[in-house]
Image (cartoon, helix red, strand yellow):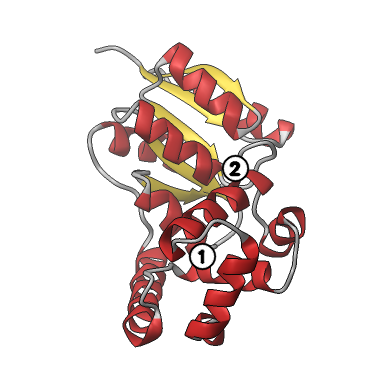
Amino acid sequence: MPNIKVLIADDQELILESLHIVLSLEEDIEVVTLARNGEEALHGCEEFQPDIVLMDINMPVMDGVAATALIKKRLPDTKIIMLTSYKEVEYVLAALSHGAEGYLLKAIHPKDLAAGIRVVHAGGTLITQEMAGKMIKSMNMNHTSTVKSNEYGLSARELEVLHKLASGLRNQDIAEALFLSEGTVKNYISTIYSKLHVKGRREAARIARDSGLLDHN
C-alpha cells in the first residue's frame, strides 16, 4: 500500500520542522514538501499532489482558510486538516465550509496526529466534541440573527467586516482588528459588495446603516 503523502503548512519554522520530524518517523507517512504560507501551500499541492494537507490557520501572504478554499476548488480530492493553537470557531467554520476535513490543535500528541491523518485519509473527519458543540451553538446564533434581520444573507464574520468598513477602517486596519490576512479581508469585502449589490465602500456603509445591519454586530 502506498504511503500517505502529506504537505505541512505553517509559518513558524520550529513547528514546521517539528511536525516534519515527527511524521517522518511514521512508516506509512511521507512528507512531500513544506510550506510557510497559504500561497506556498497552494503551489505545493499543485506540484506534489499530496493526499493530506496539515494547514495552519494564521499565516502571512495568504491565510489557511483562504488557501483551503483555493485548494479545494482546484484539487477537490486533496484532504485538509486545519492545525491551530487557537480555539476559534469562526476560522474552523469557514475552513469546514470550504471543504476541510477536520481540525486539530497543534498541542496534540504526535501519535494522535498520525492517527488523525490516517482517519482522514481513510475518508473520515476530525472534529472534537468541544468544537462540534461550539459549531452548533454558533450556527444557531447565526441562523437566529439571519432570520431576524439579515435579509442579505451576510455571515457573522461578514457583518464584522462590514461594521469595520462602515467605521472607515482601511483593509489593513480591519485585518489587524479581526486577526485576518489582508487578502482574506479583501475577499470578504468582495463577497459583501456582491450580496449588497454595491460597488464601493460608501454605498455599502449607507445600505448597512439604513437597513439596520450594523445594529446586529
Which residue is painted at 53% across and 55% down in the image?
188
Indicate left or right for 117 with 159 as reference.
Answer: left
Residue type at numbered disc 1:
Glu
- Residue that label 2 marks: 63
Q: Is residue 212 above or below residue 86?
A: below
Which residue is painted at 61% across and 72% down in the image?
205
Is 129 or 194 nearer to us in this picture? 194
Structural crowding at the residue carrying mark 1, measured as other residues with C-alpha within 10 Å and reported as few (<14), some (14–19) or many (≥20): some
Is 33 or 139 nearer to us in this picture? 139
The kind of secondary structure element at disc 1 is: helix
Which of discs 1 and 2 lies nearer the camera? The answer is: 1
Indicate left or right for 217 with 3 as reference.
Answer: right
Q: Quadrant of residue 111?
A: top left
- Residue that label 1 marks: 158
Which residue is painted at 74% across and 69% down in the image?
168
Q: In which quarter of the image is the C terminus?
A: bottom right
Q: Quadrant of residue 139?
A: bottom left
Indicate left or right for 19 with 53 as reference.
Answer: right
Image coords of residue 34 (percent x, y): 59, 22
